[in-house]
Amino acid sequence: MGKKLWIGVLFLVFLGMVVAPAGHAKTVLKLGTSTQPSHIYNVAANYFAKIVAQKTGGEIEVQVFPAAQLGSERDMVEGLQLGSLEMTLTSTGPMGNFVPQVKLFNLPFLFKDRESCYRVLDGKIGTQIADRFTKVGIRSLGWFENGFRNITDSKRAVNSPADMKGIKIRVMEDDVFILTMKALGASPLPMAFGELYTALEQKTVDAQENPLAVIYSSRFFEVQKYLAMTGHFYSPAVLLISEMTWQKLTPAQQKIMADAGVKARDYERGLSLKADQELEAACKKEGMIITHPDKAPFVKAVASVYNNPSVIKAIGGGNADEGQKLIDEAIAAAK
């Protein structure tokens, strides 16, 4: 072999020694959300990514993809199971299809304030439900917050359940949401969030319900005239990672990811609280007519949801006794 060829071979070997370890060490994790870039999900997701990059010395890079670029919330959760997607920050809307006990958090007026929410989510009940995720190939890195949900519509101001009669309202793909809106007299239409703005614009549906942060960041004030501050659901969110991805991380990396999840959770909850404090006025400034209905008639109207045998059984994962026990424990813990 000629001298020049030997030099070339040695150079390639040296290059491989220098470049290959660095390339091997770099792990890129895609994290998808369904909300617009300015929404608190994405602000928190980028905060999480920053912590992970700093604590791992750049070994792990979390790339955030907002606005359903990687699919609907359900699509992304399924992607975690398949290993085609590494992470998502999602509402609990689709999660009941994977872990039925999550439907507990969809019960209307279960929580009176954020403190009662956190007692349940961060306590025994929330931990036990989150632990079930690993059985379906996903892992929770913390209960984040979507927030208290309110109703917007293009038909009329809502002050009582009677004002909901006949209104076509988009809901998440969950039977508890559907039953709740039926109990209020509305006509619920399950629909992926990514389709919602167009559906409102084209009058396919008259109304929708979401936290203020979603209502404002999605610019629903452009296609909805009325906003009723009903707070009928408290909607958690959850930061998830594929169990396949998790098992590829070292124990040290897993700890960094878990710790970053807790920090990002607390940060995001603070953003959600701030949004509720500021965005009602922002929606009013954009021309929305805002009402603050008495919640008592709404609570009375949806009482049937708590007594519905199919709901109780669903929350128990097919076991009505377990479902009722979980509901009773949550009510007691939320007081």
Image: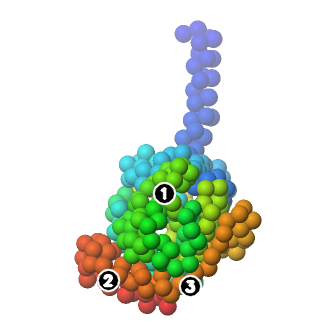
Element type at marker 2? helix
Q: CA distance from mark 2 to mark 1?
A: 28 Å
Tell me: residue 244, above or below residue 236: above
Q: Nearer the viewer, residue 262 or 119?
A: 119
User: Is residue 262 in view from this perspective?
Assistant: no
Which quadrant holds the N terminus? top right
Q: Which residue is mark 1?
A: 205
User: Is residue 286 in view from this perspective?
Assistant: yes
Q: CA distance from mark 3 to mark 1?
A: 25 Å
- Marks 2, 3: nearer the viewer: 3
Identify the amino acid type marked 1: Val
Residue 256 lies in quadrant? bottom right
Marks 2,1: beta carbons within 8 A: no
Identify the amino acid type marked 3: Asp
Q: Which residue is mark 2?
A: 307
Element type at marker 1? loop
Percent x, y of residue 100: 34, 68
> How many residues crowd around disc 1 within 10 Å: few (fewer than 14), some, or many (20 or more)?
many
Percent x, y of residue 330: 42, 84
Residue positioned 52% across, 62% down in the render: 207
Percent x, y of residue 150: 56, 71
Marks 2,3: beta carbons within 8 A: no
Tell me: residue 36, above or below residue 158: above
Q: Which residue is mark 3?
A: 294
Left or right of 263? Residue 258 is left
Q: Nearer the viewer, residue 288 or 9?
A: 288
